């Protein structure tokens, strides 16, 4: 059996051990959990049939990749794309396609800087792994060990939640909590402070909910152990040692790049330059910018256990922990085909295919105009990264999946451009709730009360102060740290609509006043109320 265990160990790209699912104490233990060995043993019958990704299979697939990319860009209209592919510690493909900005001729090349969106997460876990390997932090460290001022609503969870809990999205925080504060203009520090006002969205360490600012807090706390800001720690511990010279965790560096991709949005079927997307508040989770060439270096490091060009940049054991499954992120999709439940690790999607191969992947998506994807198959030392400067339509994922199909199966199993396009179209549909349907005006709406009934100051612990004002005969809602002014359009009686702003803004959202004796006592803003946090109570007096 030694050969079998050697194969299992290689497939999971880590020493055989237990899945990182700490108990209530936060410590790793085998009691009550699967082991990686047991997980692999379930797949032993299919391991014998797994085909290696030989250099010949890859070289046969590469000429077909060109047609895949050009066809996908033509069908989706995405203006620009760059790819890097690494195999067996060598960069075997590195190329750019299309243009940096819609309507301008400057071409994309391997050194064009793109915003990575959530592809930043596995990069962030690589940076923290470097700190772990250097003994400055441990993945099981409680957040408060390094950031004593951090607080969640539940005091016990505040004391117990660890770096790994946040990097695996199992802290109990609600899905995407904090993102709307970012849209309103709150700073990173203010958003992280306000997490203490959030009611849990699920049981601690027993529920998965994707949270940009939970992961950001973990990264910031880890950086405190190095006594430097996250942006500098990232540069010193990863980007500079790995030769990633055009990679940064600062939005200002992206803007200063002479060769950068301008994000694009699709409006009425036409592609246009998108509005600026400043992700500094959530830099570890979504704020990295980089190039295909730089990311090829990162892929090599990932696939070589933290080594690059003979130098150990990230501790191998600390990095291996990021690749292990921590919590289920969904239900098993096809048990008959041998696929296990999809997991999330530390900044990575962790999956096993029907032939027993471990897959590590992550996508990035900015509604304001960026779509990215990375996909690794560690046992084959194979990785691909695809960057686009277009609104997320699934093209980056489709190119990655089509290439891997060609390598492992010799053919593309399905039309991935269409499949991922439909998936993203469904995900991106606006869904604030059912208070109104702004697309269907009421035939006989009830009139609003006099504006005086609504005017005044309101407050919400999480979202802060809100003011309703009358400006030149129009009802205005002022919200956020900069008191952004939002015109209110009447719909019916005490319900109005406004147009949200930022990354998560789709169509209009309802603003509903609760009225007692012709005087509003509270306001509920529908798009801010997805987790029950969107009610603002009237001040007894204006501060």
Image (cartoon, rainbow, N blue to C red):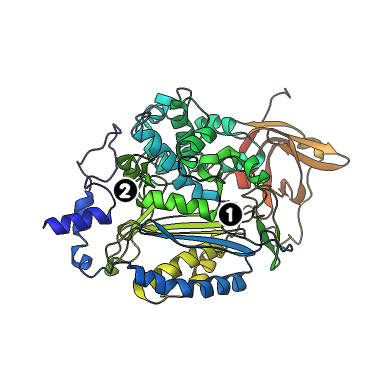
Choose between 381 and 115: the one closer to the eye.
381
Counting from the top left corner in percent of width and height, residue 281 is at: 59, 38
| The C terminus, quarter of image | top right
Q: Earlier in the sequence, mark 2 or mark 1?
A: 1
Q: Nearer the viewer, mark 2 or mark 1?
A: 1
Q: Residue furthest bottom?
A: 411
Counting from the top left corner in percent of width and height, residue 504 is at: 61, 50
Choose between 408 and 206: the one closer to the eye.
408
Residue at 53% over, 30% down: 229
Left or right, 293 with respect to 333, comes to: right
Q: Quadrant of residue 110?
A: bottom right
Residue 111, numbered circle: 1
Q: Residue furthest right?
A: 472
Left or right, 525 with respect to 40, comes to: right
Choose between 63 and 422: the one closer to the eye.
63
521 over 105 or under it: above or below: above
Residue at 45% over, 22% down: 148
Pointer 2 local density, CA inside 10 Å: few below 14, some 14–19, many at least 20: many
Residue 426 visible in rendering:
no
Element marked by disc 1: loop
Residue 446 visible in rendering:
yes
Residue 324, numbered circle: 2
């Amino acid at each position: 059996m030694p050969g079998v265990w050697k194969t299992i160990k290689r497939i999971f790209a880590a020493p055989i051990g237990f899945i990182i699912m700490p108990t209530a104490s936060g410590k790793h233990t085998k009691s009550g959990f699967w082991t990686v060995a047991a997980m692999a043993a379930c797949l032993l019958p299919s391991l014998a049939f797994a085909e290696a990704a030989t250099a010949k299979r890859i070289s046969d697939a590469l000429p077909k990749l060109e047609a895949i990319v050009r066809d996908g860009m033509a069908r989706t209209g995405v203006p620009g794309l760059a790819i890097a592919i690494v195999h067996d510690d060598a960069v075997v493909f590195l190329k750019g396609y299309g243009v940096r900005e819609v309507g301008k001729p400057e071409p994309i090349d391997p050194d064009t800087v793109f915003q990575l969106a959530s592809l930043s997460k596995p990069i962030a876990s690589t940076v923290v792994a470097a700190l772990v390997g250097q003994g400055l932090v441990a993945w099981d460290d409680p957040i408060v060990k390094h950031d004593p001022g951090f607080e969640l609503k539940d005091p016990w969870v505040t004391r117990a939640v660890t770096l790994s809990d946040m990097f695996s999205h199992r802290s109990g925080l609600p899905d995407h909590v904090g993102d709307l504060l970012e849209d309103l203009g709150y700073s990173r520090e203010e958003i992280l402070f306000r997490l203490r006002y959030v009611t849990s969205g699920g049981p601690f360490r027993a529920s998965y909910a994707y949270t940009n600012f939970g992961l950001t807090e973990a990264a910031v706390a880890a950086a405190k152990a190095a006594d430097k800001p996250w942006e500098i720690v990232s540069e010193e511990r990863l980007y500079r040692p790995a030769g990633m010279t055009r990679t940064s965790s600062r939005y200002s560096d992206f803007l200063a790049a002479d060769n950068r991709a301008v994000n694009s949005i699709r409006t009425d079927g036409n592609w246009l330059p998108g509005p600026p997307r400043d992700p500094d508040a959530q830099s570890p989770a979504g704020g990295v910018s980089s190039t295909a060439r730089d990311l090829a270096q990162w892929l090599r490091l990932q696939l070589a256990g933290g080594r690059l060009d003979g130098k150990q940049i990230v501790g191998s054991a600390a990095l291996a922990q990021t690749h292990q499954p921590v919590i289920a992120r969904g239900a098993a999709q096809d048990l008959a085909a041998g696929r296990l439940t999809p997991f999330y690790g530390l900044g990575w999607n962790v999956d096993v295919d029907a032939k027993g191969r471990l897959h590590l992947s992550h996508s990035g998506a900015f509604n304001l105009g960026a779509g990215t994807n990375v996909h690794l198959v560690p046992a084959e030392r194979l990785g691909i990264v695809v960057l686009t400067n277009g609104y997320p339509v699934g093209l980056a994922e489709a190119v990655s999946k089509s290439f891997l199909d060609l390598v492992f199966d010799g053919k593309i199993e399905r039309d991935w451009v269409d499949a991922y396009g439909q998936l993203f179209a469904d995900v991106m549909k606006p869904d604030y709730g059912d208070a109104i349907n702004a697309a269907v005006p009421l035939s006989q709406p009830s009139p609003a009360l006099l504006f005086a009934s609504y005017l005044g100051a309101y407050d919400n612990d999480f979202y802060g102060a809100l003011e309703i004002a009358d400006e030149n005969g129009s009802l205005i809602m002022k919200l956020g740290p900069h008191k952004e002014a939002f015109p209110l359009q009447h719909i019916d009686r005490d319900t109005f609509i406004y147009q949200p702003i930022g990354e998560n803004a789709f169509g209009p959202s309802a603003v509903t006043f609760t009225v007692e004796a012709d005087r509003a006592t509270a306001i509920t803003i529908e798009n801010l109320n997805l987790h029950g946090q969107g009610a603002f109570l009237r001040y007894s007096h204006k501060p």
